[in-house]
Image (cartoon, rainbow, N blue to C red):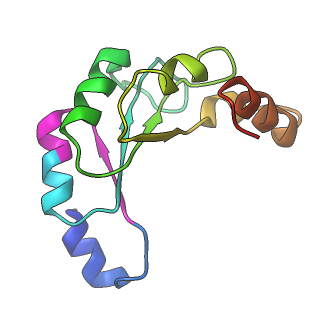
Amino acid sequence: MPAHAVRTFLGPEKIIGISCKTPEQAQQAWVDCADYIGCGSVYPTNTKENNTTVGLDGLKTVCMASKLPVVAVGGIGVLNARAVMEIGVPSLKGVAVVSALFDRESVLIETRLTGSNIGGT
């Protein structure tokens, strides 16, 4: 469902994100009035079956085409979060670390480890 249709149901105060793998999808998300883009899967992940990866080059391409903030998703954790954040595009605003947290004993510890690896807290 396009973001503008979702906005009709949820109202102007809700934050709406759109999943994108291509520059064309990123441009459409802008037209459809999304608030941000989730781009990926950057790396292989077990959280979704049959999910093709875009890699760092695909992420960078989508970011460069986007007028919206972008969050990188898919297979990102403590060992590769810094490489993702260092692709050098201003529209990349963060990473989603679902795979890093999935089935972990302590979500808090894993979150802090990933954040400290990319210079956050």
Asked if one can make out residue 51 in the rendered structure from this viewpoint, the answer is yes
Left or right of 42 on screen, residue 114:
right
Asked if one can make out residue 102 in the rendered structure from this viewpoint, the answer is no
Q: Residue at x 80, y 36 (%)?
A: 112
Q: Which residue is drawn at 71% across and 23% down?
A: 117
x, y percentage for residue 46?
55, 24
Quarter that holds the C terminus: top right
Q: Which residue is drawn at 53% across and 16% down?
A: 83
Q: In which quarter of the image is residue 110?
A: top right
x, y percentage for residue 71?
44, 42
For residue 6: magenta? Answer: no
Above or below, 1 against 87 in this view is below
The total of numbered circles placed on residues is 0
Q: Return the residue nearer the eye: 64 or 46.
A: 64
Above or below, 111 against 28 in this view is above
Left or right of 40 on screen, residue 106:
right
Q: Which residue is drawn at 55% across and 39% down?
A: 96
Q: Quadrant of residue 35?
A: bottom left
Left or right of 31 on screen, residue 67:
right
x, y percentage for residue 61?
23, 26
x, y percentage for residue 28?
13, 52
Above or below, 26 against 74 in this view is below
Left or right of 10 on screen, residue 81:
right
The part of the chain drawn in magenta is: 16-26
Quarter that holds the N terminus: bottom left
